[in-house]
Image: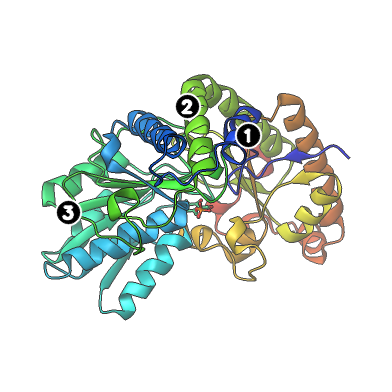
Amino acid sequence: MEVIYLDNAATTPIRPEVKEAMEPYFNEMYENPSGAYPSAIRCREEIEKVRAVIAGTIHARPEEIYFTSGGTESDNWAIRETARLLKKKGNHIITSAIEHHAVLNTCRALEKEGFSITYLGVDEEGKIRLSELERAIRPETILISIMYANNEVGTIQPVNRIGEIAQKYGILFHTDGVQVYGHLPVDVRKSHISMFSASGHKLNGPKGIGFLYVRKEIPLSSLIYGGGQEKGKRAGTENVPGIIGLGKAAEISCAMQKEEEKRIWELREHLITRLLSEIPYCRVNGSRKNRLPGNCNVSFQFLRASCLLCQLGKKGICASAASACSTGSAEPSHVLTAMGLPRELANGTLRLTLGYQNTMEEMDQVADQIKEMVETLRGKSGQYHEFRGKNLGEKIFPEKWLIPEKEKV
Ligand code: PLP
């Protein structure tokens, strides 16, 4: 069966060029980069080349890039160590209610250690309100950690404005850029970003590798103690194949960014337009404009996304109900809930995320399949039959959450 992979926000397939670049480091170039002999020194030099490439892609300096095991570690490191570094100055951190659990659970752990955390709410599109951010700032605020773009609904936050606010009040600004890095341009200087997290497997690179950018002036301590790797700040023998793969993936993604952004945006818009115009009682969540190019997050009334996913899976279409990390959880997505989506709609939500391997033909195949499956599943829904019979229309949910048939694009 041919597979159509539309779960690129969860992870992406490795590009062949990335795999090829990594291969020697599993074979003839297996040395520990800490070694004193020429072949080990060569490994070390290759790592430094990647560091410079990555720094260049976000307008940072090579010495500001630290390799980690991925997004989760980078988020933990930035937040935990900022808290430890600045606890004498203050104990207040501002984040948002729609962060990835790598940020949310780190903040919850800090709450148990006596830190006070403000979880900013979001508007209907999943965007924080800048006025609320500014109001939440206190003299003891030491960190603002707001994600660059959301992994479920794709909404991009006003990062430049958040950076300006952080700068104005002299507060460090960390952003989880895991969904953005390699897909959209990032300029840590222009956006006043103090720390930036990224992960290799979201840009067609390997899993288990990522990086944290830390502005040079911030004396962040190590999260992991051991040897002197990464200037003693992130101990442990380097994941050399991973670093090389991340470098290659970054190089390719950043070089192709503009054209891929446009191409994927068009595919996504085609898919969204078809779903909205051909399937009644569905809506797109998140901003249509300030959105990750590959993200399509749609809610279907009168069905459960788990049933739809199961049917799609049987046809070789890989998608997800909410974020991959929370699949299996009976609770509706914390992101959709924070955006105010009624529980029933949140439970009928599908996330389709596009990548470099997707085509327009696939978008049409997926739209055809979803349309047919939604009709079949609704055909078995007592609530749908009751709704059609009584023609309750918008009364089931507040009007704003439904797109009446007649208003479809
Ligand atoms: N942050 C965001 C926004 C993510 O989407 C993810 C992964 O889905 C992570 C952090 C965690 O990254 P990793 O899988 O590299 O630990």
Mark number displayed over residue 6: none
Mark closer to the observer (1, 3): 1
Quadrant of the frame with the N terminus: top right
Which structural element holds mark 3?
A: loop
Which structural element holds mark 2?
A: helix
Q: Which residue is mark 2?
A: 251
State the image coordinates of residue 18 (x, y, percent, origin top left). 59, 32
Quadrant of the frame with the C terminus: top right
- In space, the residues marked 3 and 2 are separated at their CA atoms by 32 Å
Q: Amino acid at mark 3?
A: Ile
> How would you rate the neighbour count of disc 3 (Cα within 10 Å): few for under 14, some for 14-19, many for 20 or more?
some
Q: Amino acid at mark 1?
A: Lys
Residue 379 lies in quadrant: bottom right
- Please tell me which residue lies in front, 109 or 243: 243
- In space, the residues marked 1 and 3 are separated at their CA atoms by 40 Å
Mark number displayed over residue 171: 3
Ligand 1 neighbours mark 1 (CB distance < 8 Å):
no
Q: Amino acid at mark 2?
A: Glu
State the image coordinates of residue 136 (x, y, percent, origin top left). 21, 62
Which structural element holds mark 1?
A: helix
Sooner in the amino-acid sequence: mark 3 or mark 2 = 3
Which residue: 82% across, 44% down? 316
Mark number displayed over residue 19: 1
Left/right placement of residue 116 relative to residue 182 reads left
